[in-house]
Image (tube, coloured by chain):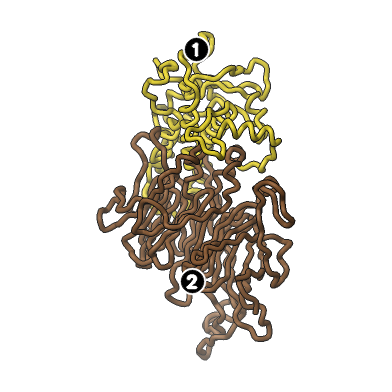
């Protein structure tokens, strides 16, 4: 299917996370400056048939501020590492946003009416002299311009010594987990003054540290099951029913290393940067530096599918190690039906793989292709030999333009792609 | 940490990669690592450890890679003992890249010597392509400039590898992250911290601390000093109480 440009939205700062809510009507971004911007999908509008699929700013608020820890002489970055929506239970929307140390629950609510005709104060807000009031009136509700308010409802702090990399809302809608480099904590959404530690891989002697936690997620349906990935390319599935402290895993997923491709960088490129369950809950997907792997939860010894994202970088690992690009953490996502997966790459390229047809496509999020309803042209990287027209050679790739964060609408083929401080929205059809 | 994707000359890159990674044809064992790869890794490790809270994933990956490199480096039959005149730790940094008197590292160092993070070749570091601007060796007040343990073994390749002191400084973070733990005093013994002595604190700075730590911290202390301890400490510093 084709991919059409819908819109590009500019934020002030580098986008650090992107997430659709459960209905797909809202799209949240977090940025390096600690701000959250929520976009809302345009409603069907007969007079503007092309507007459906567009997202416009709905609410903007400062979620986290920079903090200074005087005892450690350390600045805690306000950068939003992750946003996760809660399922909607009433008119308001709730989301969790986190920086390196503190998770916050935000309530986003609309106000489109105000009360008029108070008894004790007049329209300016000035108090009326009670002795002058001779009659009582019932205030009436009058419409006003829509105001969207965001307020912090819970602050979950002081539970993480190391840097938080993941949060995941449980299917019970009451609890969630937060993971840092060495520990995973379980929280109840109502309780902020304590959390339960469910995974702890900190060695007694820090000099023995060789592995860290890189991502964690709850199973979409089984509220007792979660997975966490490591810097050594392994995934552990844990069942909270089996023990309180889930240091012992129920399942251990690891693909044996291919001896022919072993190099000094083998471990770094095997480090998993993201793990996501499929919507069905039968599979999970992991992203390492060069590939995306789909795992069947019933098969621990190897993935069922492996997709190469940018294999042409394998011969460049030394340079990528030198400039630290090899440490970039790319995310990945499923489409609503789990038939396709998407992940980002360099040069503002992003890749989509169709699991059924095994076809893949490389597209670019760029200003040049940002004309309304323009169709995106597939891109190709030339790895050697004669470069064809429209191909780009590996050495010309811009490694500063990296797409780390992408999101797929839960039901439709609308995707959000974050390229530095630009949020691109694409969809598969035009109206 | 991020630098631009630096374009290197084709020949230069091929040489670096041939030394560092196996050819696409795939020989089972990686070729001997280049000095450059080793030095780059040491530079990254240094820079990471300079942060109060290093990026742990980055640190672990670099350290593990460094171990791999060291394992592959040709072992010395007999490592040269450190020259008698050379101090065990070098807390004073050279004046800058290429400064006169900066120790030059010739030949491949014994792996155990490298673990000590004890010598630094600033001129080498500055000449690395892609090295960040103004790269300089760790300053005097950095915890990782610990003196090497007594009786550290020489370069015997088959001696059991001692636990890496890379992360010794990470232990200092501990679960409280407090820099006021006693174990740190030894490390700072030989360092002149007179310029950092805080004898000009005023009571108002404590109020600032309280406000900044946030009204929303309802949680447990987690090892932080509480206000009473800080008050007492303040009084001691301004001389109201004698220790």
User: Where in the figure is residue A292, as x and y percent of width and height?
Assistant: 50, 55
Count residues near mark 2 (Cα–Cα under 10 Å), then give few for <14, some for 14-19, many for 20+: some
Q: Is residue B118 visible?
A: yes
Q: Along the horizontal axis of the image, is A97 left or right of A297?
A: right
The quarter of the picture where residue A174 lies is bottom left
* Residue beneath the point at 43% across and 15% down: B154
Q: Quadrant of the C terminus of chain A?
A: bottom right
Image colour for chain A is brown
* Residue beneath the point at 65% across and 76% down: A430
Q: Chain of mark 1?
A: B
| Label 2 element class | strand
* Residue beneath the point at 42% across and 27% down: B242
Q: Is residue B22 above or below residue A424?
A: above
Q: Is residue A128 visible?
A: no
Label 1 to label 2: alpha-carbon separation: 67 Å
Q: Along the horizontal axis of the image, is B11 left or right of B111?
A: right
Q: Which residue is mark 2?
A: A93
Image colour for chain B is yellow
User: Where in the figure is residue B210, as x and y percent of width and height?
Assistant: 48, 47
The one of A278 and A263 positioned closer to us in this rendering: A263
User: Where in the figure is residue B156, as x and y percent of width and height?
Assistant: 42, 17
Q: Which residue is mark 1?
A: B80
Q: Chain of mark 2?
A: A
């Amino acid at each position: 299917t084709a991919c059409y440009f819908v819109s590009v939205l500019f934020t002030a700062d580098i986008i650090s996370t992107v997430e659709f809510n459960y209905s797909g009507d809202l799209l949240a971004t977090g940025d390096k400056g600690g701000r959250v911007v929520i976009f809302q999908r345009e409603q069907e509008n007969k007079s503007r048939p092309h507007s459906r699929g567009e997202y416009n700013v709905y609410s903007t608020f400062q979620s986290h501020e920079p903090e200074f820890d005087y005892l450690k002489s350390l600045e805690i970055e306000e950068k939003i590492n992750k946003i996760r929506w809660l399922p909607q239970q009433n008119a308001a929307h709730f989301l969790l946003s986190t920086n390196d140390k503190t998770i916050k629950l935000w309530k986003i609510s609309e106000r489109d009416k105000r009360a008029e005709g108070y008894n004790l104060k007049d329209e300016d807000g000035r108090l009326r002299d009670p002795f002058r009031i001779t009659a009582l009136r019932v205030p009436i509700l009058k419409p006003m311009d829509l105001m969207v308010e965001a307020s912090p409802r819970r602050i979950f702090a002081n539970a993480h010594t190391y840097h938080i990399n993941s949060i995941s809302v449980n299917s019970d809608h009451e609890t969630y987990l937060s993971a840092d480099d060495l520990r995973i904590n379980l929280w109840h959404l109502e309780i902020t003054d304590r959390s339960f530690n469910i995974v702890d891989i900190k060695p007694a002697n820090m000099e023995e540290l060789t592995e860290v936690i890189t991502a964690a997620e709850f199973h979409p349906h089984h509220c007792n099951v979660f997975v966490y990935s490591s810097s050594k390319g392994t995934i552990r599935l844990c069942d909270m029913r089996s023990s309180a402290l889930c240091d012992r895993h129920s399942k251990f997923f690891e693909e044996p290393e291919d001896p022919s491709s072993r190099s000094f960088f083998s471990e770094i490129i095997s480090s998993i940067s993201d793990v996501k369950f499929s919507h069905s809950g039968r599979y999970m997907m992991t992203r390492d530096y060069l590939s995306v792997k789909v795992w069947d939860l019933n098969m621990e010894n190897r993935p069922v599918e492996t997709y190469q994202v940018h294999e042409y970088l394998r011969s460049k690992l030394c340079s990528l190690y030198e400039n630290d690009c090899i440490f970039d953490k790319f995310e990945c996502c499923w489409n609503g039906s789990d038939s396709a997966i998407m992940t980002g790459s360099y040069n503002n390229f992003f890749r989509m793989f169709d699991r059924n047809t095994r076809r893949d496509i490389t597209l670019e999020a760029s200003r040049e292709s940002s004309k309304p309803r323009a169709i995106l042209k597939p891109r190709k990287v030339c790895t050697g030999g004669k470069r064809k027209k429209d191909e780009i050679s590996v050495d010309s790739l811009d490694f500063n333009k990296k797409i780390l964060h992408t999101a797929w609408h839960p039901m439709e083929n609308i995707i959000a792609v974050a390229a530095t401080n630009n949020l691109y929205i694409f969809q598969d059809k035009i109206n | 940490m991020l630098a631009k994707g630096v374009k290197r000359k084709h020949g230069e890159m091929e040489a670096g990669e041939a030394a560092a990674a196996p050819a696409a044809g795939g020989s089972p064992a990686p070729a001997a690592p280049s000095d450059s790869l080793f030095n780059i890794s040491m530079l990254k490790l240094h820079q990471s450890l300079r942060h109060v809270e290093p990026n742990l994933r980055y640190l672990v990956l670099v350290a593990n890679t460094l171990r791999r490199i060291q394992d592959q480096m040709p072992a010395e039959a007999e490592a040269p003992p450190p020259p008698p005149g050379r101090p065990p730790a070098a807390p004073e940094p050279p004046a800058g890249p290429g400064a006169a008197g900066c120790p030059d590292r010739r030949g491949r160092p014994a792996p155990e010597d490298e673990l000590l993070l004890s010598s630094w070749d600033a001129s080498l570091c500055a000449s690395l392509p892609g090295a960040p601007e103004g790269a300089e060796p760790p300053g005097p007040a950095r915890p990782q400039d610990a003196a090497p343990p007594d009786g550290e073994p020489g370069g015997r390749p088959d001696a059991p590898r001692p636990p890496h002191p890379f992360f010794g400084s990470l232990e200092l973070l501990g679960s409280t992250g407090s820099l006021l733990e006693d174990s740190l005093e030894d490390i700072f013994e030989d360092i002149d911290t007179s310029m950092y002595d805080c004898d000009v604190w005023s009571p108002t700075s404590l109020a600032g601390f309280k406000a900044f730590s946030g009204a929303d911290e309802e949680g447990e202390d987690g090892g932080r000093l509480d206000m009473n301890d800080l008050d007492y400490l303040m009084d001691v510093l301004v001389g109201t109480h004698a220790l």
